[in-house]
């Protein structure tokens, strides 16, 4: 599992994940993910286009980060999940907790509309 963080206009973090979000993958990236999304106290968009598998540990990581971000009035948006990953996200209704969109442009647009 690989994680890369870059900046977008408006102090938005863009987190790119590549690999499998299984137990070992989450173990490799969770602390850096939380540093970029939660500790930084800023809105974040997460590129899932390179994630080919997500397990319960990955779902837990997203939910915990989204809830922590919300406590500081920030938003986490996931975008571009591969079909198999999207199917898992849909099966557990993750979209009810975290916005999930198809493109980065949609994710950034959504952040601009969040009060």
Image: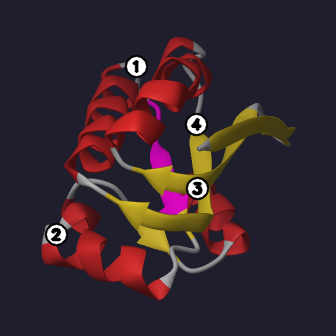
**Residue at image point 26% right, 73% down:** 88
Q: What element carries label 2?
A: loop
Relative to 110, residue 6 above or below = above
Q: Name the residue under label 4.
A: 43
Residue 98: x and y, percent?
33, 55
Bounds of the magenta span? 74-78
Q: Mark 2 points at which residue?
A: 93
**Residue at image point 75% right, 35% down:** 5
Residue 7: x and y, percent?
83, 36
Q: Is 1 placed left or right of 91 in the picture?
A: right
Q: Do the residues labelled 2 and 4 touch (CB within 8 Å)?
A: no
Q: Which of marks 1 and 4 is nearer the N terminus?
A: 4
State the mark number for residue 72: 1
**Residue at image point 36% right, 59% down:** 54
Q: Is 70 placed left or right of 101 in the picture?
A: left
Relative to 26, residue 102 above or below = below
Residue 115 appears in the rendering: no
Distance between the alpha carbons at the discs numbered 1 and 4: 10 Å
């Amino acid at each position: 599992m690989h994680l890369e963080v870059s900046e977008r206009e408006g102090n938005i973090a863009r987190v790119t994940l590549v690999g499998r979000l299984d137990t070992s993958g989450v173990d490799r990236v969770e602390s850096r993910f939380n540093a970029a999304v939660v500790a930084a106290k800023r809105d974040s968009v997460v590129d899932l286009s390179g994630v080919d598998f997500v397990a319960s540990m990955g779902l837990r990581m997203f939910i915990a980060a989204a809830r922590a971000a919300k406590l500081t009035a920030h938003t986490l948006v996931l975008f571009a999940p591969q079909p198999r990953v999207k199917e898992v996200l849909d099966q557990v209704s993750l979209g009810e907790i975290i916005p999930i969109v198809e493109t980065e442009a949609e994710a950034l647009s959504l952040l601009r509309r969040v009060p």
